[in-house]
Image (spheres, grey):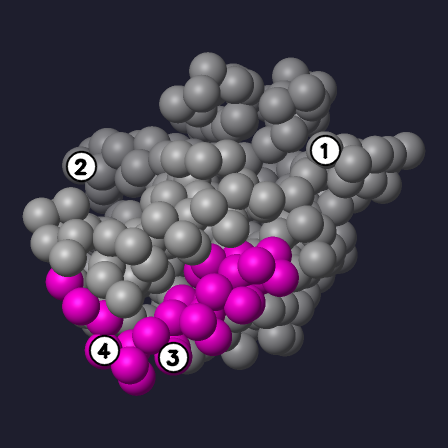
Amino acid sequence: MTVGSYIAVLAEKLQTLYPGREAKAIAETVVCHVLSIERYKCLSEPDRAIAPEQLETLQAMAAELLDARPLQYVLGSCMFAGIRIRVKEGVLIPRPETEQMFSLAAEDAEAIMDVSEDDNFNVLDICTGSGCLAYAFASEFPDAQVYGCDISTDALAVACKQRVKCIRPVFFVADVLQSPPAGLPKFDVIVSNPPYVKESEKAAMRDNVLRWEPELALFVPDDDPLLFYRALAQWEKALLKPRGVMWMEVNEALAHETAALFDGAEVLKDFNDKDRFVRVRRG
């Protein structure tokens, strides 16, 4: 079988789960991964033959994809802010919106570093999951001390084993719904992507999310959808430096309600023009 024909066959099958363009992109990604080729070669070399052992691997991966297992879990990793992050069941798959939040928060971090007279620049990622935000900051700001916390020991096990070339963040177990652990420093930048999807919103979500990704990292009860943000407001008061900044990813339908929990907060839109982020600035 050739590259072009395999992509066409797999993409057609995946259209039972994904829109046509996304199905084709997934098929191309899997083929490129197994054959170790660049994406453009799917177009420039469609008649390239797939070796029998490669085809066997592809068929095994296709079976997982057709069972709605997310592509990132099938591959075992994904790219985030220019670094490769390992993911597996038990840890949330990083989203493009979270990557955008990192980019925006990094701009604030640069500005704070430019005027700060404090030699210690500290960053905290609350609900760190895979550690994607923590590693992105550690890679972008090698002079910073980055911390990440989560209640999930499964997620922290993944975060601690990332193979990112940087000064490794300090990870620790913490329940954001409780008071911050004693002994933490004050932070210049705090970021968080806590659970914010209401239980009633499950009906609109795909099987590849509902069946595979951890509910602990996604859902909140309909009768108390802001519980994590109320807790984050207490962490912000206790841990953010006088000129610090805090960024949070939020439910678009509750963005302004979320911002109202914080002093000096503003709502910002994502690349889809949705109210996706709340920024809290001091000083």
In the rendered structure, which segment of residues is drawn in magenta?
48-75
In front of the other: label 2 or label 4? 4
User: In the image as oriented, which residue stretches furthest toward the right?
Assistant: 223
Where 151 sits versus 204, above or below?
A: below
Q: CA distance from mark 1 to mark 2?
A: 44 Å
Residue at the spot of label 1? 204
Where 36 sits versus 120, above or below?
A: below
In front of the other: label 1 or label 2? 1
Residue in the foreground of this view, choosing between 167 and 67: 67
Instruction: Kindly identify the amino acid type of the residue bearing the numbered disc 3.
Output: Glu
The quadrant holding residue 156 is bottom right
Instruction: Kindly identify the amino acid type of the residue bearing the numbered disc 4.
Output: Ala
Where 205 sits versus 32, above or below?
A: above
Residue in the foreground of this view, choosing between 236 and 166: 166
The tag on residue 56 is: 3
| Residue shown at 63% from the left, 75% from the top | 153
Residue at the spot of label 4? 51
Of pointers 4 and 1, the one earlier in the residue sequence? 4
Assign the N terminus to one quadrant of the image.
bottom left
Of pointers 2 and 4, the one earlier in the residue sequence? 4
In front of the other: label 4 or label 1? 4
46 relative position to 106: left or right: left
Q: CA distance from mark 4 to mark 1?
A: 40 Å
Q: CA distance from mark 4 to mark 3?
A: 9 Å
Residue in the foreground of this view, choosing between 90 and 45: 45
